[in-house]
Image: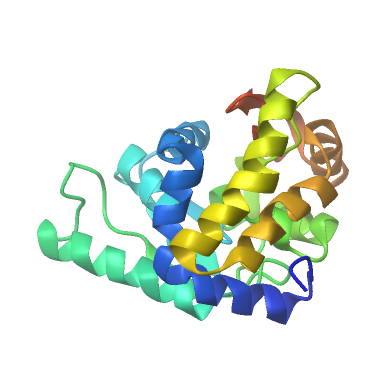
Amino acid sequence: MCTDREPRRIAAMFGRIAPRYDFMNRLMTAGLDRRWRRLAAAEAALAPGQGALDVCCGTGDLAFALAERWPRVDVVGLDFTTEMLERARQKAARRRGGAGHSHPGGGGRAPTFVHGDVLALPFADHTFAAVTVGWGVRNVPDLPRALAEMARVTRPGGRLVCLESTRPPEGFGRRFHRVWFDKVVPALGRAVAGEGCAYEYLPASVRDFPDADALAALMADAGLVRVRYRRLGFGAVALHVAEKP
């Protein structure tokens, strides 16, 4: 079923759409996803020599945004789907080949990508100065556990940054979101990616996901402090930032 959230089925679905994943992201957001990732990377507030982890990294775009915004930071991207990681590693290899070990646009060293599960992160406590996730936690079967794991590997004083689709407030944004995500996006998925079912899952997963206020509360329940968020894209995207005490 298109709305099945069983982890192996989700991983298989993302594996199938990996070849067109980046293109569909640009298409669905009119290219704004790049700007939103840059905003998320800036919120990580890193210093030279520190480390950052991007979980559910997909093809690596947020990890690359972190490396570009903070060029003297070591960035690790982690994902459960092998096909997505392969795409991310291919991008990293091209960037290394284009400019030694740095990004052609003047950014930092290319991220390292590893296979792993956000529900059982393979890192020690307090490892990273920032942990980020972009459009990933909506797909995990146990959101409180995922947030707890991200908080666990964040060092005291570090930040957790979450960029995720959310239900817009009542008004134009919500009406537009319903038409675009419920009707247009699945049609684009069928036409462009040959995966209508995967892009029917997307709006269903947003409907089932906690709204921005509820997600902020869950982050606080995970022991994080100074939790705040801002809305983007007519309110359909939320950028949450929290700190570990």
Does residue 75 appear anywhere in the picture?
no
Residue 145: x and y in percent read: 81, 61
The reply to whether residue 175 is in sight is: yes
Residue at image location 66% in from the left, 67% down from the top: 197
42 versus 103 height, above or below: above
In the rendered image, residue 157, in percent from the top left (x then y), is placed at 63, 38
Residue 41: image x %, image y %?
46, 39
Query: Residue 85 or 233: which is nearer the viewer?
Result: 233
Position of residue 57 relative to residue 65, above or below, is below
Locate residue 236, reporting x and y percent: 66, 33
Give the quadrant of the N terminus. bottom right
In the displayed structure, 159 sits above or below 226; it is below
Q: Quadrant of residue 55?
A: bottom right
- Answer with left or right where residue 130 lies relative to residue 221: left
Q: Residue at x 72, y 54 (%)?
A: 138
Total labels drawn: 0
Residue at position x 75%, y 54% in the image: 205
The colour scheme used to paint the residues is rainbow
Q: In the figure, residue 107 lies in which quadrant?
A: top left
Residue at image coords 73%, 76%: 7
